[in-house]
Image (cartoon, rainbow, N blue to C red):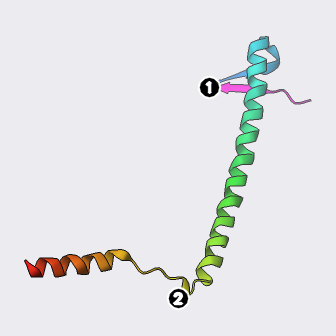
Amino acid sequence: MNTWTYINEENKYNVELLNYDAKTAFNHLVEVQTEIQMLRKKVVILEAAAVSLNSTIQSNLTEDALLVEEVEETLLVEEEEASLE
């Protein structure tokens, strides 16, 4: 049977010998750390999915869907107005 230990700096503690509150907190800590590990794995998977989805979009971009920037048109109007002054 494995003995659960809690390590604090250089000291190791037998969790079974701690009081009820400490044991309960330790059990919650183990659950939280397990959940964090699962979420980290999920983030890695989601990031890989995002890269793949972005790649699919990039490879399917077309000229028909390209938007013309209105900034260019605005600059031309401002330049024309400035030359009239």
Front one among 16 and 70: 70
Residue 14 shown in magenta? no
Circle 2/circle 1 CB separation < 8 Å: no
Residue 7 in the image: x percent, y percent? 68, 27
Considering the numbered disc 1 on the image, is that residue within a helix, a strand or a loop?
loop
Residue 63: mark in rendering? 2
What span is colored magenta in the figure?
1-8
Q: Is residue 7 left or right of residue 27?
A: left
Instruction: Classify mark 1: residues with Cα within 10 Å, few (<14), some (14-19) or many (20+).
Output: few
For image coordinates 66% across by 71% down, the residue present is 53
Front one among 75 and 3: 75
Residue 69 in the image: x percent, y percent? 39, 77
Q: Tag 1: residue type?
A: Glu
Residue 39: mark in rendering? none
Q: Which residue is under mark 1? A: 10
For image coordinates 47% across by 79% down, the residue present is 67
For image coordinates 74% across by 16% down, the residue present is 22
The residue sitting at the top extreme is 19
Q: Is residue 14 left or right of residue 44?
A: right
Mark pair 2, 1: CA separation: 64 Å
Residue 14 in sight here: no
Q: How many marks?
A: 2
